[in-house]
Image: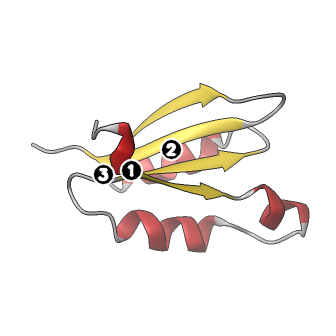
Amino acid sequence: MPPLNHFKRFDVRALIHRGMEPFPEIFKRVSALKPDEGLIVVAPFLPSPLVEKLTGEGFASKVERGSGADWLVYFWREVA
């Protein structure tokens, strides 16, 4: 896992609240990650399908409970 200061944060709560699907933007952002970078997705619920999909695309992840009902999901590429 890259150092936390190499992670970018993407809060999808407002997109979801407006009824928008955040996956295309999340995928664009994780696809652009360099090997020493990561993305933190802030979501209003545990996005299990997102974690499964990105794991299948070769990303590692870590899930943390945020404040209230929010979740933080860290994504990065595992370096072999």
Where residue 22 appears, as percent x and y from the top left, is 68, 66
Q: What amino acid type is highlighted by mark number 2?
A: Glu
Contact check, label 1 and label 2, Cβ < 8 Å:
yes
Q: Which secondary structure, mark 2?
A: helix
Badge 3, how many Cα within 10 Å: few under 14, some, many 20+?
A: few
Question: Would you name the residue on which mark 2 appears?
Answer: 52
The residue located at (90%, 69%) in the rendering is: 18
* 29 in relation to 37, above or below: below
49 with respect to 33 (left or right): right
47 with respect to 18 (left or right): left
Badge 2, how many Cα within 10 Å: few under 14, some, many 20+?
A: few
Residue reaching furthest right?
Answer: 18
The residue located at (15%, 45%) in the rendering is: 79
On the rendered image, what quadrant is the N terminus found in? top left
Contact check, label 3 and label 1, Cβ < 8 Å:
yes
Q: Which secondary structure, mark 3?
A: loop
Question: What is the distance, in whole Å, between disc 1 and disc 2 at their CAs?
Answer: 6 Å
Question: Would you name the residue on which mark 1 appears?
Answer: 56
Which quarter of the picture shows residue 15? bottom right
Is 26 in front, or is 2?
2
The residue located at (30%, 54%) in the rendering is: 37
Badge 1, how many Cα within 10 Å: few under 14, some, many 20+?
A: few
The residue located at (83%, 31%) in the rendering is: 69
Question: Would you name the residue on which mark 3 appears?
Answer: 58
Q: What amino acid type is highlighted by mark number 1?
A: Gly
Is 16 in front, or is 67?
67
Is 78 in front, or is 33?
33
Which quarter of the picture shows residue 73? top right
